[in-house]
Amino acid sequence: MDARALGSALRAEAAALAAAADLAPGDREVPGCPGLTVAGLVRHVGSVHRLVTRWVTRGSRPTEWPRSPGGADPVDWYRIGAATLIAVLDPSRAGEPAATWCPWDRTVGFWLRRMVHETAVHRVDAQAATGLSAPLNPALAADGIDEVLTLWLGCHLPPAANTGGRAVALRVPGREWTVALHEQVVDFCPLGDPAAVVTGSASAVDLWLWGRAPLSGLSVEGDVDAVHALRAAVAAVTR
């Protein structure tokens, strides 16, 4: 997705999260995040937004992380932080240098993309707490799959992660990724012969990778153990 589309998605997902949080009692549990309430979810996302705003504006990783709304209404506090973040991550600035935690992307665009997906997944969480079920936009979800595989696994692959060299293909309408995990190495092998193939909508695959949707909602062919190993590796790096 280009920066303009990501900017539009960030605004839409941030607004939808706040709207869902307004509908649910703060003490209601979030189905996709055991032990987390709606109020806790709002504080978490609001604090991440503020952290990234400081990271970009100060040019370095912040030493302080504002995690509490204090006496303010949590959803109002979240909305203020989201609006500030959106202003800082103006798509027109996507190519400008910025401090990040990604070795190969030191731009504002890194944070724009990262915050879209952070917000979108938690929007799904907030809506689930209200009993709603709204999928991710297909283009956004496909980009989210790519981010999980290339950024999260690429930067933080845990030493124990291993599919034994067995490649897993993830197929969604219009796109496909084939990846194998070796000890401390992610092997992207688009021409490889996968041991397993996972097929579904982009939203369902992305949310499965993030632990928000069951594998049973997808079509799985081949080595299921390799599929579970891939998901376990993603879980380890996205906690």
Image (cartoon, grey):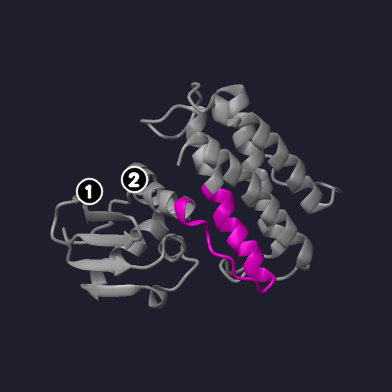
Q: Secondary structure at mark 1?
A: strand
Q: Residue at x 29, y 55 (%)?
A: 176
Q: Residue at x 64, y 41 (%)?
A: 49
Q: Which residue is mark 1?
A: 188
Q: Secondary structure at mark 2?
A: helix
Above or below 120: residue 24: below
**Residue 165 image position (x, y, % from top left):** 16, 58
CA–CA distance in space, label 1 to label 2: 9 Å
How many neighbours does mark 1 have within 10 angstroms: few (below 14), some (14-19), or many (20 or more)? some
- The quarter in which the N terminus is drawn is top left
Q: Which of the 4 image quadrants contains residue 169?
A: bottom left
Q: Is residue 190 left or right of residue 131?
A: left
* Amino acid type, label 2: Thr
**Residue 182 image position (x, y, % from top left):** 20, 53
Q: Residue at x 24, y 62 (%)?
A: 168
* Amino acid type, label 1: Phe
How many neighbours does mark 2 have within 10 angstroms: few (below 14), some (14-19), or many (20 or more)? some
Asked if residue 235 is among those painted magenta in the image, a careful observer would answer no
Asked if residue 125 is among those painted magenta in the image, a careful observer would answer yes
Is 86 in front, or is 152? Answer: 86
Q: Which of the 4 image quadrants contains residue 67?
A: top right
Is 96 in front, or is 66? Answer: 96
Q: Is residue 56 left or right of residue 47?
A: left
- Which stretch appears magenta? 117-139
Farthest right residue in view: 71
Q: Which residue is mark 2?
A: 150
**Residue 147 image position (x, y, % from top left):** 40, 47
The answer to whether marks 1 and 2 mark residues whose Cβ atoms lie closer than 8 Å is yes
**Residue 194 image position (x, y, % from top left):** 17, 62
Q: Residue at x 62, y 37 (%)?
A: 51
